[in-house]
Amino acid sequence: MSKRDEYVKKLQAKLDEWNADIDKLEARAKEIGADARKTYDRKLTELRAKRDDAVVRLQSLREASEAAWQELRAGMELAWEALSEGIQSAKSQFK
C-alpha cells in the first residue's frame, strides 16, 4: 500500500467517525426547543458544508497522481482541521 493510500484510508476512517458525530448532533437537535434549534441548525449547516468540502478534497486526493497528491495534502489538512474544530465546538456547545 502506498503512502497516499494509507493517508486516504486514515482520512476516510476519520471522516466516517465525524459523519457519525454529525448524525448524533442531528438526532439531538430534534429533541431541543425552537429557540435553541435555530442555533443548532445553523451550526449543523456549517458542519455539513465543511464535511462536504473535505469529501471533495479527499476524492481529489484519491484521484491525484503519486506526484501530485503531496501538493493537495496541504489543502486537505486545512479542510480537515476546520471540520475537526467545528465538530469539537458543536459537541461542547450542545452537550
Image (cartoon, helix red, strand yellow):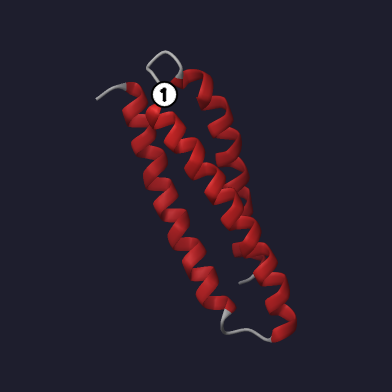
Asked where in the image residue 81 lies, by quadrant, the reply is top right
The image position of residue 57, as x and y in percent, is 50, 36
Q: Is 73 placed left or right of 40 in the picture?
A: left
Which element carries disc 1, helix, strand or loop? loop
Can the viewer see residue 36? yes
* Residue drawn at (48%, 62%) of the image: 21
Q: Is residue 4 above or below residue 91?
A: above
Tell me the quadrant of the picture where the N terminus can be found.
top left
**Kind of residue at disc 1:** Ala
Can the viewer see residue 87? no
Q: Which residue is mark 1?
A: 64
* Residue drawn at (36%, 25%) of the image: 4
Name of the residue lying farthest toward the top: 67
Q: Is 53 placed left or right of 63 in the picture?
A: right
The image position of residue 16, as x and y in percent, is 40, 53
The image position of residue 87, as x and y in percent, is 58, 56
* Residue drawn at (63%, 84%) of the image: 32
Q: Is 95 placed left or right of 24 in the picture?
A: right
Q: Is residue 11 above or below residue 1?
A: below
The image position of residue 58, as x and y in percent, is 45, 37
> How packed is label 1: few (under 14 Cα within 10 Å), some, or many (20 or more)?
some
* Residue drawn at (59%, 77%) of the image: 29
Seen from the viewer's position, the closer of residues 15 and 94 is: 15
Q: Is residue 52 above or below residue 1?
A: below
Q: Number of callouts in the render?
A: 1
Tell me the quadrant of the picture where the C terminus can be found.
bottom right
Name of the residue lying farthest toward the left: 1
